[in-house]
Amino acid sequence: MMTLSLAVRNLLRNRRRSLATLLAMAIGSTSILLFGGFSANINYMMHTHHVRTGGHLQIQHRDFYQYGNGNPSAYGINNYQELIKAIQADEVLRDMVLVASPTLQFGGIAGNYAANVSRTIIGNGFVAQDINRMHEWNDFDVKKKEPPFVLEGAAEDAAIVGIGVARVLQLCDALHIDNCPKPQSDAKPASAGVPDDIATLSQQDAADASIGQGKSAPTARRLDVLVVNAGGAPNVTAVEVIKAQEQGIKELDEVYMIMQFPHIQKLMYGSSAPKATSIMLQLRHSDQIPAATERLTPILAKFSVNQPLAVLDFRTLNPFYVQTIRMFDTIFGFVFILIGGIVLFTVSNTMNTAVVERTVEIGTLRAIGLRRSGIRGLFVTEGALIGLCGAVLGVLIALMLAALVNQSSLDWLPPGNVEPLPLTITVIGETRMIVGTTIGLMVIAVLSAWWPAYRAADLKIVDALRHV
């Protein structure tokens, strides 16, 4: 207690220098926490987006993740309905799993035979009502809301395409897409047209669909899609494009299509047993992934007799998310080291100056019996007090600035997003980050004070008392 009292008195005696050092510590702590809060918010938003759109876990054929894009129908899951029922009936999983929904990946050719254009596509078939239920997940209370999935309640032949697909297939006017340039009339390549055999098939299919639905003619938003079925033969169907959405990545935006799950399933499998390429599982909480994976193991073993199945979490399925979080963690570490170096220099300079100014005081304390360890403890305590007070002040400033930013309605457009997101900084609730930053800066402050404290304790009593 005597050492603590002397340390407080010495810091108050040199208020200007102590305040300057304290502010340097506080600014460093604030900077670290604000960047850490920004990084944490990006993590939460990306985490939430991937869970809303693809679930926490996906059950697939063991080789689908590596080879399925080339031939999705060859890696379909047999008896997927029974597998979903087994998951929902499990006494543990039924309390964890919010949504269990099948998906079907496909590839093919989409053509607008009226405009004589076509292009290759890849896409997915989703159960629309399940997707809208998944969009409600918000375990981290992020402000961003997913737009409603417009295929719910739409016709069975409804579809959504990427903006790039709509532009190439000349659907901009029909879908009222802004900033959608049209090709010049003299710039049409000869290969852009739909092959005659596909055009004949699609016209016949469109005519049959129009008669069956009581329509006189296909609309301007109607496309013809050719997909290879499970037997290897081509199937053609007509779909009604009800919306074009940006996908955030141009390469995907140029080829992506979403269809109703039952419609694409009939197209690919016809009268044969239907399959799904994946089963998405959305859990109540992300920390349930290990327990759910372990619980799924015996269930998958039962259904893997004739088909090897595997369960993959959303991090494995979305390597870009993992790479982004690692990048921000690396930047956070670099910022911490940089600010730590500034703090190290500032506190060390303050303590070295204090040793020079207090040489006589050090000699007096040594003369009245204070040991070298006591002198070292005194200076180290002063450094620790500066570190603690500076870190705590930085936490308070960071909390206030974060609250101000969160209430300012600012937004920003991160890479891979098509709509601006609210700019928020998550500091409140990040206990691990706050405690880690505070302890880290205190340790740096103590280390900064150690060498000056060692020098002070090493002074000879007679030389110190003669110092003017």
Image: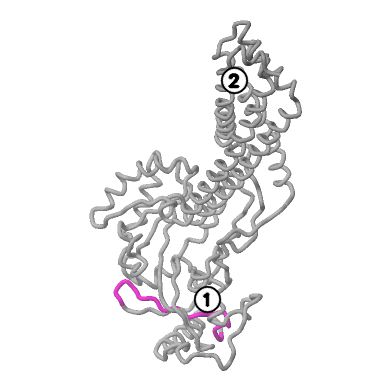
> Magenta part of the protein: which range?
216-232
How crowded is the residue under tag 2: few (<14 C-alpha within 10 Å), some, or many (20+)? Answer: many
Residue 218 among magenta residues: yes
- Residue pointed to by mark 2: 456
Judged by depth in the image, the label closer to the viewer, 2 or 1, is 2
| Picture layout, residue 93 above or below residue 77 | above
Crowd rating for badge 1 (residues with CA inside 10 Å; few <14, some 14–19, many 20+): many
Query: Which of 200 and 340 lies nearest the eye of the viewer?
Result: 340
**Residue 95 vertical placement versus 248 (above, below):** above
The three-letter code of the residue at mark 2 reads Ala
Q: Secondary structure at mark 1?
A: helix
Quarter placement of the C terminus: top right
404 lies left or right of 105 = right
Kindly identify the amino acid type of the residue bearing the numbered disc 1. Val
Which image quadrant: the N terminus?
top right
Asked if residue 407 lies in the magenta stretch, the reply is: no
Question: Residue at 73% of width from left, 52% of height from top?
Answer: 409
Q: What percent of the width, then of the height, locates residue 207?
A: 48, 86
Q: Write down the residue under mark 1.
A: 165
Q: Nearer the viewer, residue 172 or 438?
A: 438
Q: Position of residue 342 (x, y in %)?
A: 61, 39
- Camera-side residue: 39 or 382? 382
Please report contact status of discs 2 and 1: CB closer than 8 Å, yes or no: no
Toward the top, the furthest residue is 368
